[in-house]
Amino acid sequence: MLKSIPFLNNLAVSELGFGAAEIGNLHRMLSDEEAHAVLTAAADAGVTLFDTAPFYGHGLSELRLGQFLRGRPSGGYILSTKVGRYMTPPGAEPTPSVWASPLNFAPVFDYSYDGTMRSLEQSRMRLGLPTPDIVFIHDLDRGNHGSNFDAQFRIATGGVIRALHALRASGDVGAIGVATNEGDVGAMLLNEGDFDCALLAGRYTLLDQTALVDFMPVAKARGVKIILGGVFNSGILATGARDGALHDYAPASEPVMRRVRALSAICDRYGAPLAAAAIQFAKAHPSVASVLVGASRAITMARAIEALHAPIPGDLWRELSQAGLIAPDAPLPA
């Protein structure tokens, strides 16, 4: 079973959380029964933190997660969702999508005050639950907005940030935070408001510790607890450097493949699975309360929990550090 970790005020979270993108049909289609089965497996294993977003399956993830959580005791779980997009009827031309079979809606970015309220109201209706425990600002970064990022950030400072502060003050949401794939942008957002927590994806992993430079110091200074996502960097730290391995949602480059091969070689010498090293390294940072794992099958959750508890000799971490494969100031697992 999983430990419960103190998080915010009277909230505690499981040391592993459930990232609900895959029950939104990320890359492959799940039936409602399959989605319910993997959620049940997660909850039975002690997972209490469930994270979703309107974008996941264009509302499908929230719909399925809400159906599941409404059947569980109130107070027995922590639910987080996100704002920054709302759904509209689809346009005439379908757009390329990572979702195998999303709901028939089109996502629209909107970081304004009114757009935030519209996004949250739609989420409540899909979830069937009135008060999310945590609401994050979602995907406000250069990767999603390119040359329009600065304009979107300006809208957010007087829009979504102000809206979330008002919603927390009124009790319409519990805690508020930022969810980002870019550490420097996450740090910028944290400095713009009074946030309770943050979700950082892919920037503090066994492969990438750039968040130690920008994001982690700001989070610590502001007393912000962190949930980590993307600790396998889209899969390569789970599968190893095999043909077709993905890194940050794209085919892995040769430099990334070489680095993963070097990580794997040291792990192999100590008989430690690469995935176990990846999840335990991420969890060891003192600012990290929980690590999200995405899963579409019960066995995936079981393997993640096994990886979290797998014995790893201390010498492995020291060798990784001496080889320059992890940052010298990265906290190492005990």
Image: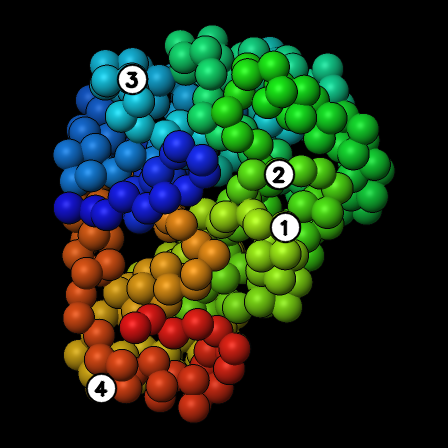
On screen, residue 161 above or below 249: above
For the residue carrying disc 1, how many other residues have a C-alpha within 10 Å: few (<14), some (14-19), or many (20+)? some
On screen, residue 213 above or below 168: below
Q: Which mark is residue 195?
A: 2
Q: Earlier in the sequence, mark 4 or mark 1?
A: 1
Mark 2 → mark 1, Cα distance in angstroms:
8 Å
Q: Earlier in the sequence, mark 4 or mark 2?
A: 2
Q: Image quadrant for the C terminus?
A: bottom left
Q: Earlier in the sequence, mark 2 or mark 3?
A: 3
Residue on which the image places disc 1? 222
Q: Is the Cβ of the residue at disc 4 closer than 8 Å to that at disc 1?
A: no
Q: Is residue 268 left or right of residue 126?
A: left
- SS under mark 4: helix
Residue on which the image places disc 4? 269
User: Could you say where residue 73 lies in the image, as x and y percent from the top left?
Assistant: 23, 18
Q: Amino acid at mark 2?
A: Phe
Q: Is residue 89 left or right of residue 153?
A: left
- SS under mark 3: loop
Q: Amino acid at mark 3?
A: Ser
Out of 302 and 312, give the one closest to the viewer.
Answer: 312
Mark 4 → mark 1, Cα distance in angstroms:
40 Å
Q: Which mark is residue 130?
A: none
- SS under mark 2: loop
Residue on which the image places disc 3? 74
For this orientation, the residue located farthest to the front is: 9
For the residue carrying disc 2, how many other residues have a C-alpha within 10 Å: few (<14), some (14-19), or many (20+)? many
Q: Amino acid at mark 4?
A: Arg
User: Could you say where residue 234 lies in the image, as x and y percent from the top left?
Assistant: 43, 54
